[in-house]
Image: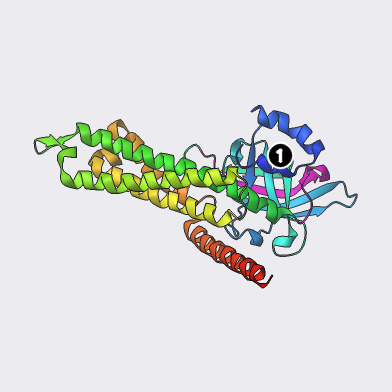
């Protein structure tokens, strides 16, 4: 609902919206977003899956592969990045592919953590899709994907920061109850120090997430870099929170049942927060590049104003 449906709402034709949105919005059908391929992840412009118009012009014939597609195994539709033109970002389009179509093969992938994510490998072999399933116009895919990434990264940052808070609160609950050397663990200065450090990071991260959400709500432009940074930072905070919780729970933090079950699960899911939506290093680099670009744009505007 957060990733596959918004492009249809924002850019889909009225006919496409009326045909698919009622079932999607009522939960009678599901949609995933299919961008990543075996050879193209954060480098969206490198996508190779092709959509070629049929001889009669009424359909696209789609060939290619999509990998690590969240929810794909259970989805009815895939909002799919395809190449309808030449190389580079200008050749990309978005196409809504019904996953029950002939030529579509779905294979669930076993991944670290994220047991409920339905991570899927999708193979597309001569899949025929109506031209009316094109979202927006041909060649506009990159712009739509980047816009969608902004909301995807915000939702990841929200969920990830919440996971970090749960990890810290679980650790606090444990050290209040657990006794060692004749007193509760929380009476140990080193334990309080660990909780203070990670707790401060979680609170700071959440304040930043709320600030970014408010700025998006106000319609602020050029948010791509900030969203990349807040998403990357959320993964770092979660990694620290989960690691701290495991250390404080000791053996319980490594056990998939009992008192440490929740902390162990969060710790195992950390890579699922760091990699999807843009890997950490790519997000950090994007954030700085966007900051520099916006800075230079502001300087040019100031210089142009001073000349007037």
Residue to which mark 1 is pinned: 9
Per the image, label 1 sits on a secondary structure element best described as helix
In the picture, the quarter occupied by the C terminus is bottom right
Q: Residue furthest bottom?
A: 307
Is 175 on the left-hand or right-hand side of 35?
left
Name the outermost residue toward the right: 56
- The stretch of residues the image draws in magenta is 117-139
In the figure, 159 relative to 126: above or below? above
- For the image, the number of numbered tags is 1
**For the N terminus, which image quadrant?**
top right
Residue occupying image coordinates x 64% and y 34%: 30
* Residue in front for this viewpoint, 264 or 125: 264
Give coordinates of residue 270: x percent, y percent.
41, 47
Residue 289 x %, y %: 55, 65
The question of residue 163 being in magenta is answered with no
264 left or right of 217 in image: left
Q: Residues within 10 Å of mark 1 (few under 14, many from 20)?
A: some
Residue 73's quadrant in the figure?
A: top right
Left or right: residue 16 versus residue 248 is right
Q: Is residue 98 visible?
A: no
């Amino acid at each position: 609902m957060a990733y596959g449906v918004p492009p249809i709402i924002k850019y889909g034709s009225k006919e496409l919206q009326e045909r698919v949105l009622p079932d999607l919005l009522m939960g009678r059908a599901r949609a995933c977003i299919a961008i990543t391929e075996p050879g193209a992840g954060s480098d969206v412009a490198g996508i190779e899956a092709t959509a070629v118009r049929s001889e009669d012009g009424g359909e696209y014939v789609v060939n290619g592969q999509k990998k690590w597609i969240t929810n794909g195994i259970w989805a009815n539709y895939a909002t799919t990045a395809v190449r309808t033109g030449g190389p580079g970002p200008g050749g990309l389009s978005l196409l809504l592919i019904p996953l029950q179509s002939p030529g579509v093969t779905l294979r669930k992938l076993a991944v670290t953590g994220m047991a409920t994510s339905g991570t899927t490998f999708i193979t597309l072999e001569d899949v025929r899709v109506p031209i009316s399933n094109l979202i927006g116009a041909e060649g506009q895919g990159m712009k739509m994907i980047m816009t969608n990434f902004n909301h995807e990264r915000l939702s990841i940052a929200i969920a990830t920061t919440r996971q970090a808070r749960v990890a810290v609160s679980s650790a606090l609950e444990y050290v209040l109850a657990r006794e060692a050397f004749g007193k509760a663990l929380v009476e140990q200065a080193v334990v309080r120090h660990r909780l203070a450090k990670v707790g401060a990071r979680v609170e700071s991260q959440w304040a930043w997430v709320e600030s970014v959400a408010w700025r998006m709500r106000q319609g602020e432009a050029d948010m791509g870099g900030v969203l990349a940074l807040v998403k990357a930072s959320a993964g770092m905070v979660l990694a620290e929170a989960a690691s701290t919780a495991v250390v404080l729970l000791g053996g319980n933090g490594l056990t998939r049942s009992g008192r440490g079950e929740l902390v162990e699960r969060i710790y195992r899911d950390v890579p699922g927060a760091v990699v999807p939506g843009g890997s950490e290093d790519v997000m950090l680099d994007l954030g700085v590049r966007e900051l520099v670009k916006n800075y230079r744009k502001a300087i040019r505007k100031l210089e142009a104003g001073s000349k007037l």
